[in-house]
Image (tube, rainbow, N blue to C red):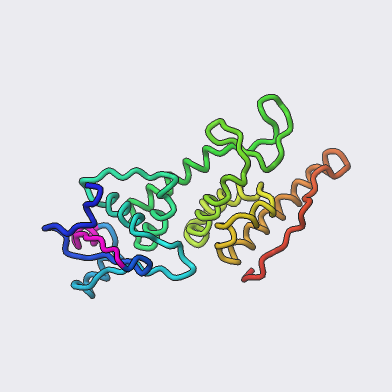
Amino acid sequence: MENYFHIPNEFSDVKISFKNENDTILYANKAILSEASPIIKAFLAIEPDSIFIIDEDDEQSIITSTDVNDLLKFIYPQFTMKITEQNIIGLIHLSEKYLIETLRNECKKYVYTWLNDLELTTFDEKKEFVPRHILYKDGTRKHIASEISTLCAWLHEYSSRDENISSLILNILKHASTDDLERNEIFLQITDREKTTIYKTISEYLEQQTIIDKDSSGTIHHKQSTSLMFASGDA
Protein backbone atom coordinates (compact mmCIF):
# COMPACT_ATOMS: atom_id res chain seq x y z
CA MET A 1 0.00 0.00 0.00
CA GLU A 2 2.99 2.31 0.41
CA ASN A 3 3.28 2.75 -3.39
CA TYR A 4 -0.48 2.72 -4.01
CA PHE A 5 -0.53 6.10 -5.78
CA HIS A 6 2.63 5.45 -7.80
CA ILE A 7 1.06 2.63 -9.83
CA PRO A 8 -2.11 2.99 -11.96
CA ASN A 9 -5.04 0.76 -11.03
CA GLU A 10 -8.62 0.19 -12.21
CA PHE A 11 -9.88 3.18 -10.19
CA SER A 12 -7.22 5.72 -11.19
CA ASP A 13 -8.42 8.10 -13.92
CA VAL A 14 -6.28 11.20 -13.37
CA LYS A 15 -2.53 11.73 -13.27
CA ILE A 16 -0.76 14.16 -10.93
CA SER A 17 2.62 15.48 -12.07
CA PHE A 18 5.14 17.86 -10.53
CA LYS A 19 6.97 20.82 -11.99
CA ASN A 20 9.97 20.10 -9.76
CA GLU A 21 9.95 16.31 -10.21
CA ASN A 22 9.76 15.65 -13.93
CA ASP A 23 9.88 11.86 -13.69
CA THR A 24 7.25 11.45 -10.94
CA ILE A 25 3.58 10.68 -11.63
CA LEU A 26 0.93 9.88 -9.04
CA TYR A 27 -2.36 8.22 -9.99
CA ALA A 28 -5.66 9.13 -8.35
CA ASN A 29 -9.41 9.03 -8.73
CA LYS A 30 -11.29 12.10 -10.04
CA ALA A 31 -14.39 11.54 -7.92
CA ILE A 32 -12.41 11.31 -4.67
CA LEU A 33 -10.31 14.38 -5.52
CA SER A 34 -13.41 16.36 -6.55
CA GLU A 35 -15.23 15.46 -3.36
CA ALA A 36 -12.29 16.64 -1.25
CA SER A 37 -11.43 19.87 -3.09
CA PRO A 38 -13.67 22.38 -4.90
CA ILE A 39 -10.56 23.80 -6.60
CA ILE A 40 -9.54 20.46 -8.07
CA LYS A 41 -13.19 19.72 -8.94
CA ALA A 42 -13.40 22.93 -10.97
CA PHE A 43 -10.14 22.15 -12.77
CA LEU A 44 -11.24 18.62 -13.67
CA ALA A 45 -14.60 19.90 -14.91
CA ILE A 46 -12.83 22.20 -17.39
CA GLU A 47 -9.97 19.85 -18.27
CA PRO A 48 -11.30 16.34 -17.55
CA ASP A 49 -8.60 14.56 -19.52
CA SER A 50 -5.64 16.68 -18.41
CA ILE A 51 -2.83 15.87 -16.06
CA PHE A 52 -3.19 17.80 -12.82
CA ILE A 53 0.14 19.62 -12.34
CA ILE A 54 1.47 20.70 -8.96
CA ASP A 55 3.05 23.93 -10.15
CA GLU A 56 4.51 25.99 -7.32
CA ASP A 57 6.07 29.40 -7.86
CA ASP A 58 9.21 30.68 -6.16
CA GLU A 59 7.29 32.43 -3.36
CA GLN A 60 5.52 29.28 -2.24
CA SER A 61 6.66 26.24 -0.35
CA ILE A 62 8.24 23.61 -2.59
CA ILE A 63 5.66 20.85 -2.56
CA THR A 64 6.98 17.36 -3.26
CA SER A 65 5.37 14.13 -4.38
CA THR A 66 5.77 12.91 -0.79
CA ASP A 67 3.56 15.79 0.41
CA VAL A 68 0.89 14.99 -2.17
CA ASN A 69 1.15 11.27 -1.39
CA ASP A 70 0.41 12.12 2.26
CA LEU A 71 -2.49 14.32 1.15
CA LEU A 72 -3.99 11.50 -0.91
CA LYS A 73 -3.66 9.13 2.04
CA PHE A 74 -5.61 11.62 4.13
CA ILE A 75 -8.54 11.95 1.71
CA TYR A 76 -8.74 8.29 0.63
CA PRO A 77 -11.00 6.36 3.06
CA GLN A 78 -8.91 3.19 3.13
CA PHE A 79 -5.86 4.98 4.56
CA THR A 80 -5.15 6.39 7.99
CA MET A 81 -2.88 9.43 7.73
CA LYS A 82 -1.35 10.88 10.88
CA ILE A 83 -0.29 14.54 10.88
CA THR A 84 3.21 14.94 12.29
CA GLU A 85 5.82 17.65 12.70
CA GLN A 86 7.52 16.23 9.59
CA ASN A 87 4.54 16.45 7.20
CA ILE A 88 2.47 19.30 8.68
CA ILE A 89 3.95 22.14 6.57
CA GLY A 90 3.21 20.48 3.23
CA LEU A 91 -0.27 19.45 4.37
CA ILE A 92 -1.08 22.99 5.57
CA HIS A 93 -0.03 24.42 2.21
CA LEU A 94 -1.98 21.91 0.14
CA SER A 95 -5.11 22.04 2.30
CA GLU A 96 -5.21 25.85 2.15
CA LYS A 97 -4.37 26.11 -1.55
CA TYR A 98 -6.98 23.55 -2.63
CA LEU A 99 -9.53 24.32 0.13
CA ILE A 100 -9.63 20.79 1.53
CA GLU A 101 -11.77 21.65 4.54
CA THR A 102 -11.36 18.50 6.63
CA LEU A 103 -7.59 18.63 6.31
CA ARG A 104 -7.52 22.40 6.97
CA ASN A 105 -9.33 21.81 10.24
CA GLU A 106 -7.04 18.94 11.26
CA CYS A 107 -3.92 20.98 10.48
CA LYS A 108 -5.19 23.91 12.54
CA LYS A 109 -6.04 21.57 15.42
CA TYR A 110 -2.48 20.20 15.29
CA VAL A 111 -0.95 23.71 15.23
CA TYR A 112 -3.12 24.94 18.12
CA THR A 113 -2.18 21.90 20.22
CA TRP A 114 1.52 22.32 19.40
CA LEU A 115 1.49 26.02 20.30
CA ASN A 116 -0.43 25.40 23.51
CA ASP A 117 2.18 22.85 24.56
CA LEU A 118 4.81 25.60 24.56
CA GLU A 119 5.34 27.35 27.87
CA LEU A 120 7.11 30.69 28.10
CA THR A 121 8.04 31.63 31.64
CA THR A 122 10.06 34.25 33.50
CA PHE A 123 10.96 31.97 36.40
CA ASP A 124 11.45 28.21 36.49
CA GLU A 125 10.21 25.80 39.17
CA LYS A 126 13.21 26.68 41.32
CA LYS A 127 12.17 30.34 41.04
CA GLU A 128 15.37 31.10 39.18
CA PHE A 129 15.29 33.73 36.45
CA VAL A 130 14.88 32.29 32.94
CA PRO A 131 16.15 34.33 29.94
CA ARG A 132 13.47 35.35 27.46
CA HIS A 133 14.87 33.01 24.79
CA ILE A 134 14.11 29.89 26.87
CA LEU A 135 10.83 27.99 26.61
CA TYR A 136 9.45 24.67 27.77
CA LYS A 137 7.93 22.06 25.47
CA ASP A 138 6.58 18.78 26.84
CA GLY A 139 8.28 19.59 30.12
CA THR A 140 11.69 19.96 28.46
CA ARG A 141 13.65 23.20 28.65
CA LYS A 142 14.60 24.34 25.12
CA HIS A 143 16.06 27.38 23.43
CA ILE A 144 13.56 29.12 21.18
CA ALA A 145 16.10 29.01 18.32
CA SER A 146 15.29 25.30 17.94
CA GLU A 147 11.68 26.14 17.04
CA ILE A 148 12.21 29.15 14.74
CA SER A 149 12.05 27.10 11.51
CA THR A 150 8.70 25.57 12.41
CA LEU A 151 7.21 28.84 13.62
CA CYS A 152 8.35 30.83 10.57
CA ALA A 153 7.09 28.18 8.15
CA TRP A 154 3.68 28.22 9.83
CA LEU A 155 3.57 32.01 9.91
CA HIS A 156 4.28 32.05 6.17
CA GLU A 157 1.27 29.78 5.54
CA TYR A 158 -1.16 31.48 7.93
CA SER A 159 -0.14 35.17 7.90
CA SER A 160 -2.73 36.06 5.26
CA ARG A 161 -5.20 33.28 6.12
CA ASP A 162 -5.70 33.06 9.88
CA GLU A 163 -5.14 36.09 12.09
CA ASN A 164 -5.62 34.18 15.34
CA ILE A 165 -3.00 31.51 14.58
CA SER A 166 -0.62 34.17 13.26
CA SER A 167 -0.96 36.13 16.52
CA LEU A 168 -0.21 33.03 18.58
CA ILE A 169 2.90 32.32 16.50
CA LEU A 170 4.13 35.92 16.79
CA ASN A 171 3.53 35.81 20.54
CA ILE A 172 6.21 33.11 20.71
CA LEU A 173 8.54 34.52 18.06
CA LYS A 174 8.73 37.82 19.97
CA HIS A 175 10.99 35.99 22.44
CA ALA A 176 13.57 35.18 19.76
CA SER A 177 16.71 37.23 19.27
CA THR A 178 17.39 38.92 15.95
CA ASP A 179 20.71 37.06 15.72
CA ASP A 180 18.96 33.68 15.98
CA LEU A 181 16.36 34.73 13.41
CA GLU A 182 18.90 35.92 10.89
CA ARG A 183 20.88 32.68 11.17
CA ASN A 184 17.76 30.66 10.37
CA GLU A 185 17.31 29.49 6.78
CA ILE A 186 13.50 29.41 6.90
CA PHE A 187 13.32 32.94 8.32
CA LEU A 188 15.50 34.16 5.45
CA GLN A 189 13.12 32.56 2.93
CA ILE A 190 9.85 34.12 4.14
CA THR A 191 8.59 37.35 2.59
CA ASP A 192 9.91 40.79 3.54
CA ARG A 193 6.46 41.66 4.86
CA GLU A 194 6.51 38.66 7.18
CA LYS A 195 10.03 39.48 8.38
CA THR A 196 8.96 43.06 9.09
CA THR A 197 5.97 41.83 11.09
CA ILE A 198 8.24 39.67 13.24
CA TYR A 199 10.75 42.47 13.79
CA LYS A 200 7.96 44.88 14.71
CA THR A 201 6.45 42.40 17.17
CA ILE A 202 9.83 41.90 18.87
CA SER A 203 10.45 45.64 19.02
CA GLU A 204 7.05 46.33 20.60
CA TYR A 205 7.57 43.53 23.12
CA LEU A 206 11.00 44.79 24.18
CA GLU A 207 9.72 48.34 24.47
CA GLN A 208 6.89 47.14 26.69
CA GLN A 209 9.28 45.12 28.87
CA THR A 210 11.55 48.13 29.25
CA ILE A 211 8.61 50.24 30.46
CA ILE A 212 7.54 47.53 32.91
CA ASP A 213 11.06 47.19 34.32
CA LYS A 214 11.44 50.95 34.59
CA ASP A 215 8.11 51.37 36.34
CA SER A 216 8.80 48.60 38.83
CA SER A 217 12.30 49.62 39.90
CA GLY A 218 13.09 53.02 38.44
CA THR A 219 15.96 51.56 36.41
CA ILE A 220 16.07 49.73 33.11
CA HIS A 221 17.11 46.09 33.53
CA HIS A 222 16.19 44.72 30.13
CA LYS A 223 17.95 45.87 27.02
CA GLN A 224 18.27 44.35 23.60
CA SER A 225 21.96 44.04 22.73
CA THR A 226 21.39 43.80 18.99
CA SER A 227 19.55 46.66 17.29
CA LEU A 228 16.46 45.66 15.34
CA MET A 229 16.90 46.18 11.63
CA PHE A 230 13.55 46.27 9.83
CA ALA A 231 13.23 44.55 6.48
CA SER A 232 12.96 46.86 3.52
CA GLY A 233 9.84 45.24 2.04
CA ASP A 234 6.27 46.46 2.16
CA ALA A 235 5.23 47.73 5.57
Outermost residue to the top:
126
What residue sits 42% from the left and 50% below the top? 88
Q: Is residue 147 above or below residue 198?
A: above
Residue 125 image offset from top left, x and y in percent: 66, 26
Q: For residue 100: magenta?
A: no
What residue sits 47% from the left and 70% below the top? 58
Residue 153 image offset from top left, x and y in percent: 51, 55
Q: Is residue 128 above or below residue 26?
A: above
Q: For residue 30: magenta?
A: yes
Quadrant in which residue 81 is drawn: top left
Residue 103 image offset from top left, x and y in percent: 35, 51
Q: Camera-side residue: 53 or 161? A: 53
Residue 149 image offset from top left, x and y in percent: 55, 52
Q: Is residue 128 left or right of residue 85?
A: right
The number of numbered badges drawn on the structure is 0
Quadrant in which residue 61 is drawn: bottom left
What residue sits 38% from the left and 45% below the top? 83
Magenta residues (range): 23-35
Work out which quarter of the rendered image holds the C terminus and state it. bottom right
